[in-house]
Image (cartoon, helix red, strand yellow):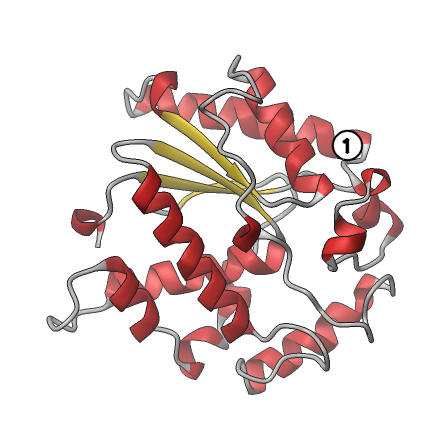
């Protein structure tokens, strides 16, 4: 698949946030963009460590900073993480290297039944996902819903950048799901499809999507994906 992709991609889950620290689910756009739900002090440190790791990856691959693009979710915790990373890399946060927010990278919305409740409830949702990734919690997004918008986010980044190192700063579930479809796309051998959008659509089937937890990331974890 790397032959049909114009850029190289790394994913970064936001650093430990205030909702993480408080043990609550903050998944709606309304709550997620509130300034009081940005990074906790531990999370700022995690973001700094991730930036240092990313810098080492760039150096190891001989990628100049001029070719870096940072794309991030509109939530406070992801915007804060992207800002910390750009600062450490000496890339102006309001400059051309830090792409304006990509809405499709936002947190998975878990629905009104789970919003602002204990994060212990995640397991209930993941059990649903494993049984039927097309179902989702009541009033919230299914794995399939999130996979569709992440495929759109990939198309957006591929259309806007060429020959870049793209750092995608997002959330636990979206990044698990993104890795799931990218991994499956990489294994996809169907010769009928030779463009990224078609392949990412073709792999959005239940046996693949239900396995997204295999690609879980810790807070502040950086991972190369393509």
* Residue 41 image point, x, y percent: 80, 29
Compared to residue 3, the image places residue 190 above or below, namely below
* Residue 154 image point, x, y percent: 39, 52
Residue lying at the far left in this picture: please name it: 191
At x 53% / y 83%, what residue is drawn?
A: 134
- Could you say which is closer to the camera, residue 119 or residue 67? 67
Secondary structure state at the residue bearing disc 1: helix
Q: Quadrant of residue 109?
A: bottom right
At x 82% / y 65%, what residue is drawn?
A: 115
At x 53% / y 35%, what residue is drawn?
A: 100
Q: Along the horizontal axis of the image, is 143 left or right of 113?
A: left
Compared to residue 210, the image places residue 3 above or below, namely above
Q: Which residue is mark 1?
A: 42
Q: Along the horizontal axis of the image, is 157 left or right of 133?
A: left
Q: Along the horizontal axis of the image, is 39 left or right of 163?
A: right
At x 21% / y 55%, what residue is drawn?
A: 1
């Amino acid at each position: 698949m790397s032959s049909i992709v114009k850029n190289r991609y790394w994913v970064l889950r936001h650093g430990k946030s205030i909702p993480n620290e408080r043990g609550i689910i903050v998944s709606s756009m309304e709550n997620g963009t509130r300034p009081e739900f940005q990074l906790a002090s531990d999370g700022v440190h995690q973001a700094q460590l991730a930036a240092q790791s990313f810098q080492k990856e760039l150096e190891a691959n001989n990628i100049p900073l001029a070719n870096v693009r940072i794309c991030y979710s509109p939530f406070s915790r992801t915007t804060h993480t992207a800002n910390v990373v750009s600062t450490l890399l000496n890339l102006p946060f309001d400059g051309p290297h830090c792409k304006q927010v990509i809405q499709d990278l936002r947190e998975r919305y878990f629905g009104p039944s789970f919003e602002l409740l204990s994060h212990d409830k995640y397991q209930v949702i993941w059990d649903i996902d494993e049984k039927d990734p097309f179902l989702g919690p009541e009033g919230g997004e299914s794995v399939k819903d999130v996979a569709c918008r992440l495929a759109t986010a990939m198309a957006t980044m591929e259309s806007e950048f060429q020959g870049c190192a793209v750092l995608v700063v997002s959330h636990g579930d979206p990044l698990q799901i993104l890795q799931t479809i990218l991994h499956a796309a990489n294994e996809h051998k169907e010769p009928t499809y030779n463009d990224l959008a078609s392949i990412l659509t073709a792999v959005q089937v239940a046996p693949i999507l239900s396995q997204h937890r295999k690609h879980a990331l810790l807070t502040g974890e950086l991972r190369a994906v393509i």
